[in-house]
Image (cartoon, helix red, strand yellow):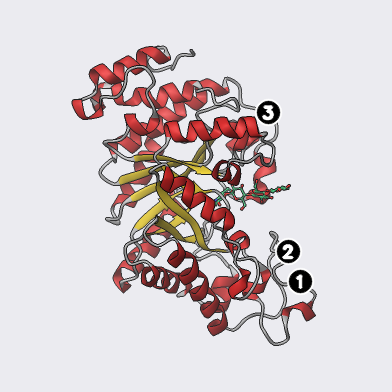
Amino acid sequence: MMKTQFHALPFGAIALAVALFADGATTVAAENPTLKDVFKDHFMVGTAINRSIATGSAGFRRSLEFVEKDIALTKDQFNQITAENDMKWQLIHPREGADGYDFKPADAFVDFGVSNQMYLVGHTLVWHSQTPNWVFAGTNPPPASVGGVPGARPGRGVYTGPRASRDELLERMRDHIHTVVGRYKGRVKVWDVVNEAIADGAGTNILRESLWLQIIGPDFIARAFEYAHKADPDAILRYNDYGLENPVKRQKLITLIRSFKEQGVPVMAVGSQAHINVSTSFETMDQALTDMATLGLPIHITELDINTAASGQRGTGADIGANASLTEGGLISDADRKLADAYAGIFRAFIKHRDAVKVITFWGVNDAVSWRRSGSPLLFDGNNQPKPAFDAVLGVLTEPDFK
Ligand code: G3I
């Protein structure tokens, strides 16, 4: 087994160290420490799962044999799961009307989690991306007459036909949220109610120029949270975004969430995606968590991965459209070691802020199923073998500061 830079302890020795030196509450089985057990007194450790894992069937780029191994790894290591794609509007509600829902894959996700006693996160109710055109289309003239086939190609392009009125779009949003949240009430414990609504860049605009903003106005976020709260008053409602390691974007988040709290909008947790690269240090994450914790809400790290692709060191974007350029060019030199160091650094920050950080979700179970697969960004390789980064993460709790 490979070694971490920090402890120079082989995997087995880290296992023993965690068992022997952690305080009584964090003692875990010495033989095969798992993420969920090692961190159980601090936060949940979860993963996004794809449809193949939820349904137990061969899938995109993964044979059944490997899917079964992915399922075993998921059950072994994680106590929380998020649906990577199947609860997105495009997939769960592709067509207009009461018959326009396709619940089968999302139902499989929920069944998988419930039967394995996992904490379930629903992702995501309102997003500028992966939303079918019909949602934004005006009914007069009907959308089919303006060149679009409603519901057929949600795609990445932004809908450009005649638009729904504010009331029409609010009603579609309300119906969608009530139907989806209502269906899984009591089982899905956390919802990403609104995803990635904050504008990138240094401009003064807080909100992204999405169709939600343009058609409804800035209160679209507040309305979405109110609808979700009505649909399941016990669910934890999360605002989720990426790039919050950047102080400018983070300040926009803080301004936005403060204003929600002042208005009594039921936002209950901050989701920080953390699609980062190896230059994100302990200090960077520590500062981000320190600032976000001033909001007084639980912080969930919602989509964690660390890109080791050479070209992926420039940014921390989360747009699937820009992904190819961020995963080209081969890996950085000494990628395994740099990944281990970066993971150890950010986990030190998570542990330091354990009073605020309640959930850590990796965005995929292993490198092979990651949206950034060419950037080898996760703790397990495509054969589900732990990488040095896995040892480094487990090793953090054996450090003197955290014992
Ligand atoms: O399943 C189909 C397959 O049948 C088809 O042959 C193939 C052809 O391209 O596409 C497959 O679907 C892809 C799907 O991922 C499953 O792999 C879609 O094209 C692709 O667009 C989709 O990308 C997802 C992306 O969000 C867009 O929704 C990624 O898996 C998913 O990891 C990514 O996750 C987002 C979060 O939701 C929000 N934050 C950023 C994060 C990364 O972009």
Instruction: Look at label 3 and name its amino acid.
Output: Gly
Where's residue 261, x and y in %?
A: 31, 67
- Determine which residue is flagged by label 2: 153
Where's residue 93, x and y in %?
A: 60, 66
- Are the residues at dot 3 and dot 2 in contact (C-beta closer than 8 Å)? no
Badge 2 local density, few (<14 within 10 Å), some, or many (20+)?
A: some
- Determine which residue is flagged by label 1: 149
The CA span between labels 1 and 3 is 39 Å
Q: Is residue 245 visible?
A: no
Which type of secondary structure does the marked residue at label 2 adopt? loop
Instruction: Look at label 2 and name its amino acid.
Output: Arg
- Are the residues at dot 2 and dot 1 in contact (C-beta closer than 8 Å)? yes
Instruction: Look at label 1 and name its amino acid.
Output: Val
Badge 1 local density, few (<14 within 10 Å), some, or many (20+)?
A: some
The residue under the point 39% across, 13% down is: 12
- Are the residues at dot 1 and dot 3 in contact (C-beta closer than 8 Å)? no
- Determine which residue is flagged by label 3: 330
The CA span between labels 3 and 2 is 32 Å
Which type of secondary structure does the marked residue at label 1 adopt? loop
Q: Is residue 380 above or below residue 239?
A: above
The CA span between labels 2 and 1 is 7 Å
Question: Viewer-proximal residue, 68 or 212?
Answer: 68
Outermost residue, left side:
24
The residue under the point 42% across, 15% down is: 11
Q: Is residue 193 above or below residue 136?
A: above
